[in-house]
């Protein structure tokens, strides 16, 4: 048991450094999310190396700098989530303020031995706050997407949810392993324990970290831009829609004109076949401000943007499912009609038709056969 934790720490440090070098060498740092990814890998690698030296090579001879490391993970995860959510995310001077508490905890051991219980409580509570802020940001993103994007379910949303779940698991394991007998380190790393539950919780921390490191680099290397994200304008449009009463900037006659142009464009040009079709792109195609189009869709058609687009995609899918000569699979058809995920399509189709796509296709073929 004593060799498992140092071994896991060494593996985490090695992988972090290896992947960090790959990110730097392969010039993937043009993407802001990858820069924050790199910072997280470097902090975690340095932290693991410090733990190994302080616990295995030079026990107790180094200042207790590990407290400061624990204060960095919350801000880095939060800013990583924000960089994925917002298309126009830019790092500014205010973002450095998130790391001041960690820097201060680095400096404290040079003149005074810090209270372990106080530092542990501070790190746990800070991590909890940043996780809550990250979940709130994700919730706001999902709400905005419904009114401005056609692909409401994406790899990125699932990925961000998994990142937050892994971090919440680390936090839980840390709290479990913190007990009255012994505490050597706190935060997103080693916490010593004399009981079996604490030891297994400590091992679980590093296993979770190892999984997270591999997941981070998988996304960073293979999918450097998970999705386009939303803009501040998208947020403003959504806020305008959900306000009570909804804000209308144009009169009813102008809305009717936009409605006619919109319906004609959707029917003739079928822009909904593009998987990443958005309110912004629709505005460019019609030559109208996106917020005006949003007012028409929500006010006159009584739908949000996502449901509006999906209704056209479902009708397109139904056209192919009704054709007995259509040999393509349902999956091939839904991708050709603009849906980006099978689960998103199945949910929308069943809500719209009351049956599954397979049941619909079978019933239509039976009707066609009986007519013949």
Image: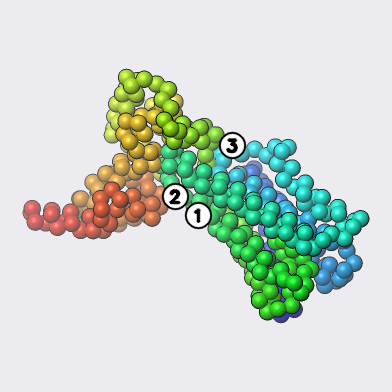
Asked if marks 1 and 2 touch (Cβ < 8 Å), the reply is yes
**Which element type, helix, strand or loop, lies under badge 1?**
helix
* Left-right relation of 333 to 89: left
Q: Residue at x 59, y 49 (%)?
A: 134
Q: Position of residue 86 (x, y in %)?
A: 57, 40
Image quadrant occupied by the C terminus = bottom left
Q: Foreground residue, 216 or 116?
A: 116
Quarter-of-image position of residue 273: top left
Q: Residue at x 74, y 77 (%)?
A: 194
Looking at the image, what colour scheme do you see?
rainbow
Q: How many marks?
A: 3
Q: Is residue 295 above or below residue 18?
A: above
* Residue assigned mark 1: 158
Q: Position of residue 44 (x, y in %)?
A: 72, 59
Q: Residue at x 72, y 57 (%)?
A: 123
Q: Foreground residue, 85 or 336?
A: 85
Q: Position of residue 102 (x, y in %)?
A: 77, 51
**Which element type, helix, strand or loop, lies under badge 2?**
loop
Asked if marks 3 and 1 touch (Cβ < 8 Å), the reply is no
Quarter-of-image position of residue 331: bottom left
Q: Is residue 309 above or below residue 341?
A: above
* Left-right relation of 348 to 44: left
Label 3 environment density (alpha carbons within 10 Å; few <14, some 14–19, many ≥20): some
* Residue assigned mark 3: 88
Please tell me which of labels 3 and 1 falls first in the chain: 3
Q: Foreground residue, 74 or 125?
A: 125
Give the number of the disc on residue 153: 2
In three-dimensional space, the C-alpha distance between marks 2 and 3, rounded to whole angstroms, equals 20 Å
């Amino acid at each position: 048991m004593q060799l498992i934790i140092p071994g896991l720490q060494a593996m985490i440090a090695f992988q972090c450094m290896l992947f960090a070098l790959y990110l730097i060498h392969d010039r993937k740092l043009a993407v802001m999310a990858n820069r924050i990814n790199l910072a997280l890998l470097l902090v975690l690698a340095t932290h693991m190396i410090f733990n190994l030296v302080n616990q295995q090579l030079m026990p107790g001879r180094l200042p207790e700098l590990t407290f400061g490391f624990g204060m960095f993970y919350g801000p880095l995860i939060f800013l990583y989530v924000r960089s994925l959510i917002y298309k126009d995310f830019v790092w500014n001077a205010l973002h450095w303020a998130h790391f001041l508490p960690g820097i201060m905890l680095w400096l404290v051991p040079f003149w005074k031995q810090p209270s372990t219980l106080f530092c542990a409580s501070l790190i746990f509570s800070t991590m909890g706050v940043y996780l809550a802020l990250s979940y709130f940001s994700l919730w706001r993103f999902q709400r905005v997407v419904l009114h401005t994007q056609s692909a409401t379910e994406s790899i990125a949303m699932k990925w961000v949810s998994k990142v937050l779940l892994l971090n919440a698991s680390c936090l839980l394991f840390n709290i479990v392993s913190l007990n009255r007998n012994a505490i050597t380190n706190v935060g997103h790393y080693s916490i010593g324990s004399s009981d079996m539950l604490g030891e297994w919780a400590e091992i679980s921390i590093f296993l979770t970290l190892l999984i997270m490191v591999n997941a981070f680099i998988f996304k960073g290397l293979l999918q450097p831009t998970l999705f386009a994200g939303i803009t501040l304008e998208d947020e403003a449009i959504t806020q305008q829609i959900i306000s009570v009463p909804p804000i209308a900037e144009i009169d009813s006659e102008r809305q009717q004109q936009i409605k006619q142009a919109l319906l004609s464009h959707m029917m003739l040009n079928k822009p909904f076949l593009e998987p990443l079709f958005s309110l912004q792109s629709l505005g460019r195609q019609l030559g109208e401000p996106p917020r005006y189009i949003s007012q028409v869709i929500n006010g006159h058609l009584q739908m949000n943007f996502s449901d509006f687009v999906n209704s056209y995609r479902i009708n397109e899918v139904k056209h192919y499912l009704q054709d007995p000569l259509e040999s393509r699979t349902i999956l091939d058809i839904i991708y050709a009609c603009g849906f980006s995920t099978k689960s998103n399509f199945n949910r929308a189709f069943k809500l719209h038709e009351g049956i599954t796509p397979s049941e619909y296709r079978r019933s239509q073929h039976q009707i066609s056969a009986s007519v013949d």
